[in-house]
Image (spheres, rainbow, N blue to C red):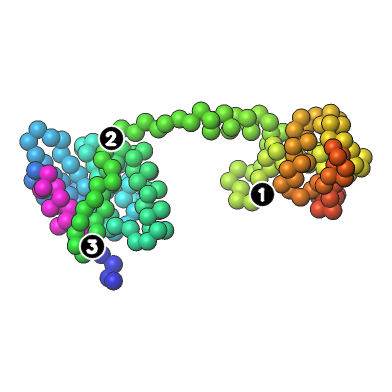
């Protein structure tokens, strides 16, 4: 299938707007599409063969003329295409931009969101989790923007338990918690997400071979 051109999007978008009672004209000033009707704010539509930073920049620039700004792109293909498209819808909502998809060659237009002021919903739970991690983390052990392993407060506590057990041998969980100051030591060692621990006896934990390897680098 030949990749569509921006001009292929215009007839379906024009017909969609005309069905809503607008008079539509193309290439009016900097606008790809402009539509007007009595008693309504003008509508501007920017056409592109795919989402891009340029498209969003153009749409934001048109908001200096009207609040009714849409972007129109060809309809997505497949599940991966939908996931990317859905993410772009969310971004456009935050920018106050409407989104149209055009199914070619039949020319069916679907409005996924209309231009409107965006007010993000805050998640108190997520905010609380971030604050908890921030306060619990010791120092600033990571480089911002890293794509590698992140040193979390949980991992810092696990490393404290490893270091103690490596130095003192199998120990009661309550003593590890008391001596290291890690109140959740029992849970960390019992869950053993890292594979650094094993239960030597009831309530007593020790360091595994992989834990000893880690402790050597501490």
Q: Are marks 1 and 3 in contact (CB under 8 Å)?
A: no
Secondary element type, mark 2 = loop
Q: CA distance from mark 1 to mark 3?
A: 44 Å
- In this orientation, does residue 156 appear? no
Q: Where, by quadrant of the figure, is residue 134 drawn? A: top right
Q: Are marks 3 and 2 in contact (CB under 8 Å)?
A: no
Which percent across, then down, holds residue 72? 25, 51
Which one is earlier in the sequence, the residue at label 2 or at label 1?
Answer: 2
Give the residue drawn at x 42%, y 58%: 80
- In this orientation, does residue 189 appear? yes
Q: CA distance from mark 3 to mark 2?
A: 27 Å
Question: Label 2 belongs to which residue?
Answer: 116
Give the residue at the far bottom of this rendering: 1
Give the residue drawn at x 87%, y 45%: 200
Which one is earlier in the sequence, the residue at label 3 or at label 2?
Answer: 3
Q: CA distance from mark 2 to mark 1?
A: 39 Å
Residues rendered magenta in the picture:
5-20
Question: Label 3 belongs to which residue?
Answer: 104
Task: Name the quadrant of the N terminus.
Answer: bottom left
Q: Is residue 126 left or right of residue 27?
A: right
Question: Label 1 belongs to which residue?
Answer: 149
Which percent across, then down, holds residue 97? 29, 41
Residue 63 vertical placement versus 105 (above, below): above
Which percent across, then down, holds residue 95? 34, 39
Q: Residues within 10 Å of mark 1 (few under 14, many from 20)?
A: few
Of helix, strand and loop, which mostly describes the magenta segment?
A: helix
């Amino acid at each position: 299938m030949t990749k569509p051109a921006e001009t292929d999007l215009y007839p379906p978008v024009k017909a969609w707007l005309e069905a809503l009672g607008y008079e539509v004209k193309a290439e009016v000033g900097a606008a790809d599409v402009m539509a007007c009707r009595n008693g309504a704010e003008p509508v501007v539509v920017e056409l592109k063969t795919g989402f891009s930073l340029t498209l969003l920049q153009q749409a934001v620039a048109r908001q200096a003329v009207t609040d009714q700004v849409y972007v129109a792109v060809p309809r997505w293909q497949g599940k991966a295409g939908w996931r990317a498209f859905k993410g772009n819808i969310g971004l456009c909502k935050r920018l106050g931009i409407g989104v149209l998809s055009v199914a070619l060659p039949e020319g069916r237009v679907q409005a996924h969101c209309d231009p409107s002021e965006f007010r993000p919903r805050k998640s108190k739970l997520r905010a609380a989790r971030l604050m908890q991690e921030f306060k619990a983390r010791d120092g600033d052990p990571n480089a911002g923007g890293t794509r590698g392993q992140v040193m979390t407060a949980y991992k810092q506590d696990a490393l404290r338990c490893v270091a103690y057990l490596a130095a003192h041998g199998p120990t009661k969980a309550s003593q590890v918690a008391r001596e290291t100051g890690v109140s959740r030591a029992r849970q960390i060692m019992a869950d053993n997400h890292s594979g650094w621990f094993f239960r030597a006896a009831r309530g007593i934990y020790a360091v595994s071979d992989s834990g000893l390897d880690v402790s050597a680098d501490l």
